[in-house]
Amino acid sequence: MVNTQRSGILLVYVCSFIFALFEHPARAENLPDPTRPPSEPVAAAASGASAAVPSSAPLLQSVLISPRHKVAIINGETVKLGGMYGTAKVVKISEGEVVLNEGGNLQTLKLFPGVEKKTPQIGEATDPTAKKMPHSKPSAVRKEGQ
């Protein structure tokens, strides 16, 4: 009789576990591809731009830099350094921005408009809450047999 009770309890636990699996099915998240350049409406919404921004405003989508070439993709158009985007000349391409010169007016297009890159200075902690460790003198190394 004891074995029957144990097997009955075990059956209840197994069935409960199986039903729990069916109640909460595993779902794959629909995540965007981080390497894909954003489309205009998505990029404008992500940067906090209002709907009043004209759709013809240049949007920097990607930057390709090699030792021999610098290329930017602006609104789906590939433009080389020194090339023209519409009536503006591309005067600078760096890893995070492109500068256009249109009639003496410089316009900077940021790859990630809401992100500002900061590089720590030598001796500066990367975590602002981190405490600096005091410098100590190196201890003398003792050789075996001394």
Image (cartoon, helix red, strand yellow):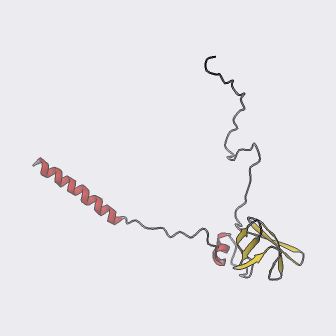
Q: Taking the image as drawn, is residue 130 in sight?
A: yes
Which residue is outermost to the right?
104
Residue 88 higher or lower than 16, as above or below: below
Quadrant containing the C terminus in the rendered view? top right
> Residue drawn at (70%, 62%), measured in percent from left and top?
115
Which residue is outermost to the top?
146
Q: Taking the image as drawn, is residue 52 in sight?
A: no
- Quarter-of-image position of residue 86: bottom right
Residue 108 higher or lower than 85, as above or below: above
> Residue drawn at (72%, 70%), measured in percent from left and top?
63
- Position in image of residue 46 (x %, y %): 65, 70
Which residue is outermost to the left?
1
- Position in image of residue 84 (x %, y %): 81, 80
26, 142: nearer the viewer: 142
Q: How many marks?
A: 0
> Residue drawn at (83%, 79%), measured in percent from left and top?
88
- Position in image of residue 39 (x %, y %): 64, 77
Asked whether, in this view, residue 63 is left or right of residue 102, the answer is: left
- Quarter-of-image position of residue 28: bottom left
Residue 128 higher or lower than 144, as above or below: below
Asked whether, in this view, residue 63 is left or right of residue 20, the answer is: right
- Position in image of residue 110 (x %, y %): 74, 68
- Quarter-of-image position of residue 90: bottom right
118, 91: nearer the viewer: 91
